[in-house]
Structure formats: structure tokens, C-alpha cells
Amino acid sequence: MIARNPSRPGDAQACRDHLLWQRPGGPFVSFFTNRYAALRRRQWTIEQGATEVVIVAVWLKELSRIYDAFAIARVLGLEKVDNPDLFLDEVLIHGEISADSYRILAMFRGIQPTVDIALCVHKMNMMVEVPGDFIVGVQVRTFICTRRLPDLTVKLGDEIYMHTGRSDDAKLFPLVLSMANLAYFYEINAAGTVITCPSAGLGWRIEAFVQWRS
């Protein structure tokens, strides 16, 4: 993925143009660190008349030249615009994410309304929203509470394999947690990849510990 003009300096004017959609040919690509923020931007884009929208899930860990869009908007005085929430949880990537970096994990295409689906990893069942286009052809169903929902766990794993060339649970689990908007800690040490997920709710708390060896 590459910005329209990756060689343009990322100065204040370039930031302003990008955040206000005032001028094409900027050096940034926008991503969101919160799933719901991405869905909000998707809906806003559709309401502006877009007929083709894609949400791209990208592995941002250890990627350089990442900037906080909301912090930039405040410095530039853009928090007074009609919709300041558009900048929440948004990050700007300067330049590009090269294809050979294998950072693209999944792509959610389409403008159909979002639907609830199930994702199940390591005995954790989660309900998340995805564009309705993404569930086409999915036959597996999983009960969450009293609802029988399409289970996209296998399809999501296949997406990661298609884009990275690897069946990688150490990428699948963080992606699922991110889609469910659950916080987690990711660490690589001598033992392998360790992911700790503390999930808090009304009167309950779960500690999930997952480990893979590379």
C-alpha cells in the first residue's frame, strides 16, 4: 500500500490536506488502531457516496514513521471542525507499506451493512462486526449467548495465509482480539511469542495466556 505522493514531505500543510481531504497527492495513508473507529470511517465514507470501500488489517508493530492523527489535528487546530471524532484512534503512515513486508493480514471489502459474526480462538468466543460482504459463502455457525452466528475464524486464518504466505496463529490471535476491541500484551522472548489478554467485564475477569514457538 502506497500513498499517492510518498515523496512529498510530511509537513503541516501535508497533514492538514490529508486530514481535511482538501488536496489529493499526499504522502500519508490512514489506518485505525480501534476497530470501531475504522467502521465509523467506513460508514462516513459510504455516506459521502463511496461505492467501493475496503478495510485493510495491517500489522503495525515495529513499523516506523507512524503519527497520531488526533494529536496532529489538535496542534493544527482542527479539533474545531464538524467531526473531530473522525481523528480518534487514527494513525498516519508516511510513504508506504511495502508488499514484501507481509504486513497486510486481511481485507474486508464491500459497502453492505455490517453484521455480527463469531470468532473463536483458544476457547474464547467473541462477537464482532464485519461488512456483510465478508460472510459470503461461510457455512459454519457458532452459538454466542442465544444467537447462532456465522463463524469466520477459519476464513480469517485463510486471509492471513493468503496475504502473508503463512498460517500464523501469532498474528491471528492478536487480529481477533483487535477486532473484538480487547486489549492484549504481545511479547517475543526466548520461549517464543507470548500473548497475555486481560479481559474485564461486569464482575468478572479472564486471564488468557497463549504461547507459540517459532
Image (spheres, rainbow, N blue to C red):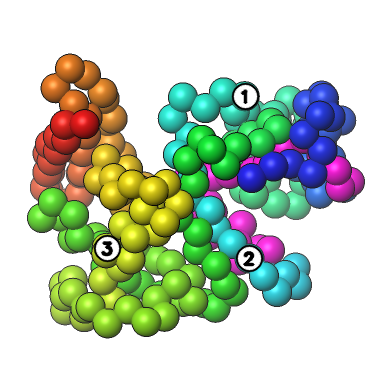
Q: Answer with left or right where residue 66 lies relative to residue 186.
A: right
Please tell me how crowded label 1 is: few (under 14), some (14-19), or many (20+) other residues with Cα within 10 Å: few
List x then y, in percent, for residue 5.
82, 38
Res 16 label: none
Q: Answer with left or right where residue 104 lies relative to residue 45.
A: left
Q: Secondary structure at mark 2?
A: loop
Residue lying at 75% horizontally and 52% vertically, measured from the top left: 82
40, above or below 164, in the image: below
Which residue in the protein does label 1 denote? 65
Residue lying at 48% horizontally and 71% vertically, measured from the top left: 131
Pick the front one: 42 or 212: 212
31, above or below 15, in the image: below
Please tell me how crowded label 2 is: few (under 14), some (14-19), or many (20+) other residues with Cα within 10 Å: some
Q: Amino acid at mark 1?
A: Arg
Please tell me how crowded label 3 is: few (under 14), some (14-19), or many (20+) other residues with Cα within 10 Å: some
List x then y, in percent, for residue 20.
80, 46
Work out whether mark 2 precedes mark 1 in sequence or the reverse, and give the earlier one.
2
The part of the chain drawn in magenta is 23-45
Q: Which quarter of the image is occupied by the C terminus?
A: top left
Give the number of callouts: 3
Residue lying at 21% horizontally and 38% vertically, measured from the top left: 197
Q: Amino acid at mark 2?
A: Val
Which residue in the protein does label 3 denote? 153
Q: Secondary structure at mark 3?
A: helix
Q: Quadrant of residue 136?
A: bottom left
Q: Which quarter of the image is occupied by the N terminus?
A: top right
Q: Quadrant of residue 13?
A: top right
Pick the front one: 78 or 155: 155
Res 53 label: 2
